[in-house]
Every structure is written in C-alpha cells, then in structure tokens.
Image (tube, coloured by chain):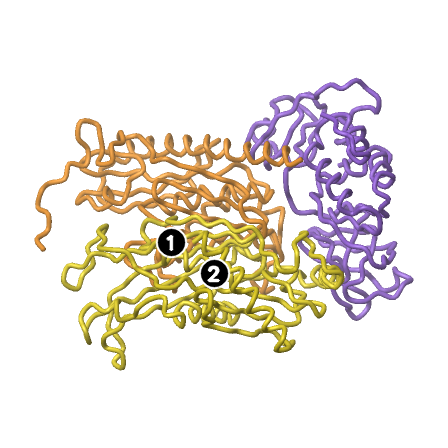
Amino acid sequence: MENIIWDLRTDNVVSLIKDGKRADGRKLDEYRKIEVVKGISENADGSAMVKLGSTGVVAGVKLVPGQPYPDNPDEGTISVSLELLPLADPTYEVGPPRDDAIEIARVVDRGIRESKAIDFKGLCIREGELAWIAFVDFYVTNNDGNAFDAGSIACLAALNETRFPKLDGDAIVKHEYSGKLKLSKQPLLSTFSKIGGKIVVDPCLAEEKAQEARFSCAVADDKALCAFQKGEGGSFKASEIDECIELAFKHAKEIRKLV
Amino acid sequence: MAKKQEKIEYVKNGKRLDGRKVDELRPVKMEVGVLSNADGSAYLEWGQNKVLVGVHGPKEALPKHKQNPYKGLVRYTYRMATFSVPDRKNPRPGRRESEISKVSGEALEKAIFLEKFPNTAIDIYVEIFDSNAGTRVAALTAASLALADAGIPMRDLVCAVGVGKAGGEIILDLNKDEEDAPDAVDIPIAIMPRTEEIVLLQMDGLLTKPEWNKAVKLGIEGCKRIYEMQKQALRKKYAEAEQEM
Amino acid sequence: MDNEIQAVAPQEGAKAEHKKKMIVVPGDLVTEERKKLGQHVFIEDGKVYSDALGITYPDSEIAYVVPLAGVYIPQRDDLIVGIIERETVKGYMVNINSIYPSYLSADKCRDVLQKASVVSAKVDAVNEINEAELFDVRVFYGGEILSVNPSKVPRIIGKNGSMLLVLKEGTGCNLLVGRNGWVWIKGGDVKKLADAIKLIESEAHLDNLTVKVEAFLKGKKVN
C-alpha cells in the first residue's frame, strides 16, 4: 500500500532535482541538520543518539572480554551490527536483520575497521587467551533516509565516549572503568544518490526511493579513503565518483566537530 | 575477590539506599509524539530506564488466517538493546522478552476499543535503551501514551508501576539494588485508573497476605501518580500541536 | 459528523467569543448531563467519557470530542481522494488512507484507470468491518497529494465551502479536499496552501478562522 504513494512522490522528487532543487529546500551538496547527544545509556560502555534531519539512530558500545581469533592471537576486534526497528518505518517488521540492514552495518564496520582508528593490538588483554571485543550495535529509530551516514556518525560518537570496564582477573568489575578507548582517526561515511542524472548528498527517504544508484564513501581523515560501497541498480561515471570523494572529505571535516 | 559480607540496610529511618522514601517514585520524564514515521509514539525516562515506543495501526492484520472477525489484535513487541543491560545482551530475543510482550499486550486489550476494528492489528513496538529495574511498567506506561498519540480509541489510559518489598519494608518503584535484596519481592502492576481495574499483575518473591494488601494499595496509588503525569504529557502535546503556527 | 462541527462553528461576522473548550484524554469525563452523543465518546454508568486525546466543548448541545489524530473510517456519501492500488478482475482496489483499501467496480467509472492513478470518488456502501465501495469516480492528472488530519477536514472546507473558497482564491491552487484527509492540489502556490492548512489544523477550534486565513494568505499578520 505504501508503495503507491511513493510512486507519486518519486516523480516530484526527480523533477525537482532535475531543476537543481530539493523538496526540503537544501542544495544538492548540503547535509540535513545533525544533532548528537552522547552518553544516553549508562549501561553501555559508550553510547550516542543522533538525528540526521528526521532520521534517528541510537548506538551503543559494549566491550566484552573474549577469545582472540587463532590467526590474530594478540588482537581484539570490533563487531558492528544494525537493527532497523519496526517503530522506525511501517514497512519494517519484527525479525532478524534484513539484507539492507546487514549491508549498512557492514559498510559502517568497514569504515571504522579499515581506517585503523582502533588499534586492535591495544585491545589485547592476554595474548592467545583474552582480548576485548568491541560490540558496536546501532538501531534506527526513525527512517527518513540515509541510515548509512546517521549510523556512521552515531557509532563514531559512541566509540569516542567508550571506556574500558575494569577487569578483575577475567571478570568485569561492574560500574568501574579503567581508561578510555582511544581512536587515532575519526572515520565517517558520506552517502550520495544519483537522481535524474544529478548527484545529491544525504538523501532523505523520498530521495532514497527515487534514486537510480547510491554511493557511500568513508574517509579516515583529510587524505585517506578507507571504504567504498556502491548500491542499487544504476551506475556512476568515474568523474561522478571523484566529485563524491571531494565532497566526502569536505563534509567529514564539518561533522567531526560534532562527534 | 571476597563478597561483601556487610548487611545492607535497604530502608533506614524511612530512607532507602538512593535516599527515597518508601512511597517515593524515581524521577519520570515523558514525551509524546517523537517519531515521525509512527502513527503514535512516546519516549519515557524512569530513573535510569530509557524507553522508546512506536505504534502502527490499526491496519489490516496479515496473514488473513490470523485475523479476528470480531475485534482487532494487539501485537506488543518488547525488546531490549544489547547495551541496555550491564552484561551485553544477545540481540536475539529471549524468553523473558516474549513473556513480557505477551502480558503487556494483554494488559492493553481491555483498554482499547478493539471491537471497533475487526480484522485489524495494532502493532506496539517497545525498545529499551537503558535499564535499571521496572522496564516493563515503564514500557507499558509509554505504550499507553503512544496509543493515545495515534488516536486509537480507548476506554482509559493504562498506567503501571512496580511495587514490592526489600529489607522487610513494602516499597514503591524498586530499583535494581533493591531487586537484588535477599528478601526482595517485585510486583509489577498496571491499572485502568478510572475504575482501578488491574490489567497486569505479576509477582516473584515471598509475601504474606497482609503484606500483599499493603503493597496493592501502594501500587494503585503509585499508578495514579503516573496517570497524572501521563495526562500532563498528553495535554502538553495537544498544546504544542496548537502552537505549530 | 458535519452537523456537530456546525453546531459550534461561529456565524460569519459574529463577534469574536471563545467557546469554552477542554482538552481531554482517553477516559476523561466529558459530561454527566443527558446529551445527544457525537463522535469519540462512550457511555459508562450513565456518564459520558472521551475515547481520544482531543478537544470537547462543554457548552455544546451534543457531547463529542474532536480528536488530535486518528485513522479515517469511511462513511456513506463521503467525497474522498484515492489512489488506485491495483486492478482486480472486474474493477480496482483503491487506497483511501483508511485501514482497508476500497473497491471500485469497473462499470462505475468512465475513464481508464491504472495503478497509481489519482481519483476523486464517493463512498457508496460500507460493511461492518469498515470496507467501502466507491462510485462517481473522476480521474486527476498531475498535481500532488497533501495529507491532513481527517477530523479537521470540515474546517478546511468551511460552512458551505467558505474556507475552501478563501484557500483557492488566496493561493491560486486547484484543489479537492477528500473527507479521508487527502487533498489533491494542482498549480498555484502549493507551499502557501500547505502553510494555510497547517494554520487551520492548529486553530480549528477557534473563531474567525476564515478571516484569519484570508489575512494570512494576503501576507498580513493577525493575532
């Protein structure tokens, strides 16, 4: 049923963008308003709530001591997952993560992991026996498009707040912490939609539904790229990707001030 | 590490561990209409608890064989975020969440005019982002607000509170430390305030009948205080909608 | 339903006087007097209560509540705006912003319809589970659909269409307001129209609204 209304809006969105305009008045390369609230969950080791326009995301980090992987006995690791909550969108259902949630989580994960922002060797507790696993779980609470970037911002903000639980032997001492997690880089995703032959950044929901193709780019700092993901059935020219990369560097610089 | 052997005084000179009196609630904040994609929504903070509720419906209940031709179905889903508890919770829902979902949905059935919506379903989604005892009553209280926000016709709001015992005293709104007391009794209770009909009632612990009588009286009184806050939050929402321009 | 609103809608040109109003939540007492019953109230033990969050007018002869939100339930003879969802063997299923789509028999419309066509139609019959059949169908081409609170529609139309006229003249828009809360709009200043409708929605219970909206559309400020 929802799809019918979207067919109508899609036409409007496409014709607006062909004229260089967007339904909410933004420029083609402009982000929506970003709000970040840190430390929203005391039980989490680090947490943050983010609003990107009307899109809402809550992220939380739990550091759990576990067995390191046999091929990396002196390293801990991160594990990023996303749940698209049914309250975020009438089309989301209760159940295990769908393909789109898995894709978003993995792209956000790659952005953090590949940037080497977290020193995995620094997560080691006892080589070969015990290491920290940083579980980064984020939840979309309201879907107005671009869970990629909203999720990336929320996860980074949550990681920046994260503290190591105090250990007594192999067990965690509740309510006590020993030091903050240090990130050497601040990786952030920027997502672009191709609509009506033009490129727009930070698509809202109506724009996401109208997009021919999508491109997300993670930047670790002012120079380094650390993840790409192209999605949907359309295509990009190499020059369009270049354009996106330049904008990604520009936007990440601004957003870093908030996390 | 040796366990602390000192005896904890849960209630001393009328004051509890966190300084509250025996009949005092933790601070509660309620906000209605926070999710643009939901038909109705509410966000509630109760002590450390943080609850978000979204409502969709009434909508056609599918698959068709699940429809009830006489009334709408209430589908209540209670879930906790992995980081909402001290030890990271497995994302897959557990039996506790299933049980809470079931009794909470049933608590709302009498309040909603389900007969007005045959063959439909009303979906209520609850997500807990931080917890410290009493999440199910916080969630139910917020769900009631979200249903009103969605314009779903109801006989009454549903208000809920936890009451129980710790350190030999009957107390209102136990926190986690009190729930861990050796003699702890936890009684989540929900009522429809106009008639004081009880729509949710659970208990675990040991209690005598006189203790129960004291507890239920305190619980109903606590629920009514929550009800006053719900009314305020809903009225505030109406006033805001008026000032939109 | 329209009768109840007109019972308290101020006469055009009457002096401004605020009719007493009360915000109620589900379960709140509306009245203990014996009154005729309108929408969104129910009786228990001889007293009348509200079933919704909304506004009630204690001085009204009819006990009713205008809700802040709620889903549209079709009534016979309602004029609605709908979107064709799909074709069936002998007709179409039409989305009318209610719990269920409505059915339109192919022999009730002269135009050729397809998925996503926008139409206006009248509600013919409604069964016990609120499923409706439509007739008297006209197709719209182009334009867009604005969604409003169905219970505010009578105010957006106004007494004898007075508010509708003000909106049309003040924005230059071609529009049709469906009782189901969907408004089809084509041409004119759509943003100004949307803002004017928001104003009506938020002040639906106040007096002299038509005058206020007229002034707003002309660009003047009225308090």
Question: Please, what is the three-letter code of the amino acid marked with disc 1?
Answer: Ser
| Above or below: residue A235 compared with residue B166 | below
Comparing C89 with C201, the one in front is: C201
Q: Which residue does the image show at 63% across and 46% down from the upper left?
A: B116
Q: Which residue does the image show at 87% across and 56% down from the upper left?
A: C138
Disc sitting over residue A47 in the figure: 1
Q: Chain of mark 2?
A: A
The answer to whether residue B102 of the structure is visible from this angle is no
Q: Which color has been applied to chain B in this rendered view? A: orange
Confirm whether circles 1 and 2 share one chain. yes
The crowding category of the residue bearing disc 2, from other C-alpha atoms within 10 Å (few below 14, some 14 to 19, many at least 20), is many
Horizontal and vertical percent for residue A1?
A: 67, 61
Comparing B143 with B43, the one in front is: B43
Q: Which residue does the image show at 72% across and 23% down from the upper left?
A: C61
Question: Label 2 near label 1: C-beta < 8 Å?
Answer: no
The answer to whether residue A195 of the structure is visible from this angle is yes
| Above or below: residue C149 compared with residue B65 | above
- Please identify the residue farthest to the front as the structure is shown: A223
Question: What secondary structure is found at the residue carrying circle 2?
Answer: helix
Disc sitting over residue A68 in the figure: none
Q: Residue under circle 2?
A: A151
**Sequence-first disc among 1 and 2:** 1
- Please identify the residue farthest to the right as the structure is shown: C110
Give the position of the C terminus of chain B as an image quadrant: top right
Give the position of the N terminus of chain B as an image quadrant: bottom left
Comparing C3 with A176, the one in front is: A176
Chain shown in purple: C
Q: Chain of mark 1?
A: A
The crowding category of the residue bearing disc 1, from other C-alpha atoms within 10 Å (few below 14, some 14 to 19, many at least 20), is many
Chain shown in yellow: A
Question: Please, what is the three-letter code of the amino acid marked with disc 2?
Answer: Gly
Instruction: Judge from the rendering whether residue B72 lies leftward or rightward of residue C218; answer left or right.
Output: left
